[in-house]
Image (spheres, grey):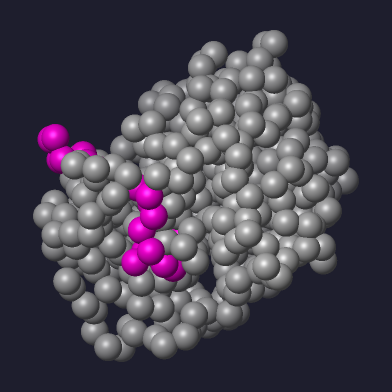
Amino acid sequence: MTTVAATLIATELPAAACGEDDKPAVQAKHTAGDPGAVKGVRAVGNVPDAAGAISANFLSYGHRDVMVVSGEFGLKVYDLTRNPAAPKAVGQLSLPGLWETEDTEVDAQRKLVFLSRDPRAFEGNTHTGESGIYVVDVSRPEKPTILSYVRVPAGHTTSCVDGCRYLWTGGPAKADDQPADWGGRPIWVTDVRDPRHPVVHPDPIELARNDGQTDYVHDVQVDSAGVAWVSGRGGVRGYWTSGLHRDPVRGGVHRATALEPIPYAGGGVDETAAPSKFLHNSFHPVGPRDAGAWRGHDLVYATEENFLDGCAGDGVLTISSLAGSYHGEGWRSTATAPFRLQSIGTWSVAGQEGSDPASDDCSAHYFDLRDHVLVQSFYSQGTRFLDVSDPTNPRQIAYFRPADASSWAPYWHDGYVYVADNVRGVDVLKLTA
């Protein structure tokens, strides 16, 4: 076990998590005596010592299968090889008080984990707190080791682009020393080709994303074609980060890089689907698999994270068509002449079978899509399995909502679903529906 210096250790959790309104990091209310609800899914395992979990990822070492879990404790490593339903703890990097490590990403080739330090970590705050990236070597799963740490002006999430040669880091709300007209932090690019000596580029990218205003970039997901989809306040926009491509904004054909990406498609999501305009994360399926193409529409899936009193107005899963956005329309959108993607379908957990009607927490959070089944976390409303073969009408087919659920992120892996639950640790599920 590796432990960092005592100066990084904190005894209390940050006061807020993520999202437009910065959801308080406290367990949501449940109905007294609520036994929970389960249908169409079987719980085959649980990892309680991962309580505080926020994100998970997976690495292969030949015939050895390993899961890395990040959270308020830092990083924990589990071996899945012998029994994937009973992950075995093998290593830990202790960083108590770390925040927030959402969507922690790994370099599968170099066996690196990139932990994002939010300015609210270690009792900090968004006004003056320090943010940055820990590059962790897990070439020996039993002994995860920090190779480097670099300060970055953003730190809510850190994502690999261009084959993990570079990282894009965004969010959360802006710091006091950042421009007054920003609504949140955009993206800073870090060169990690030498992971022991990361280099942060001083100039941010993905500016003016919210109808011309620079705003909160929450997360980045790269599709199988290499397009990096950037989600945050103002919608979802995709970029090429390598190769020669036509530039719909500047004109001509240019070489895309992580520092000078080329717009591909995307834009704001219709306010009737996502009234807060805060898109938490997204997924763009490439080709006909995974409901990627539907009646000629190229689709992008995204979640709105939004917290209002009660559940009815909380964030939803949105499904939008990219049609009409391939010529830079999303980059020319303004408050007076807005561009919006066409909404195809939405799904909300509020009032659905298996939900706790007394809970005031129904916002959508991370999801994962395999074939036509989408699995999604909804905090205290648990983990939901949706059939999205008809994206105009997502249909719930199974759910797992234990009474103490605090589901943050689910992952398909080798036929199982691993759920990072902030209270329960990691639940291992098997879909039976």
Q: Quadrant of residue 331?
A: top right
Q: Quadrant of residue 38?
A: top right
Q: Position of residue 421 (x, y in %)?
A: 48, 58
Q: Position of residue 122 (x, y in %)?
A: 42, 82
Q: Quadrant of the N terminus?
A: bottom left
Q: Position of residue 218 (x, y in %)?
A: 57, 55
Q: Is residue 248 visible?
A: yes
Q: Is residue 198 visible?
A: no
Q: Residue at x 69, y 47 (%)?
A: 354
Closer to us: 261 or 154: 154
Most extreme residue toward the top is: 295
Q: Residue at x 76, y 30 (%)?
A: 345
> For the stretch drawn in magenta, what is the main secondary structure?
strand
- Which contiguous range is marked in magenta? 45-65
Is residue 119 located in the magenta-colored stretch of the structure? no
Q: Position of residue 341 (x, y in %)?
A: 75, 32
419 relative to 311 in the view: left or right: left
The answer to whether 293 is drawn above or below residue 104 in the figure is above
The answer to whether 34 is drawn above or below residue 366 in the figure is below
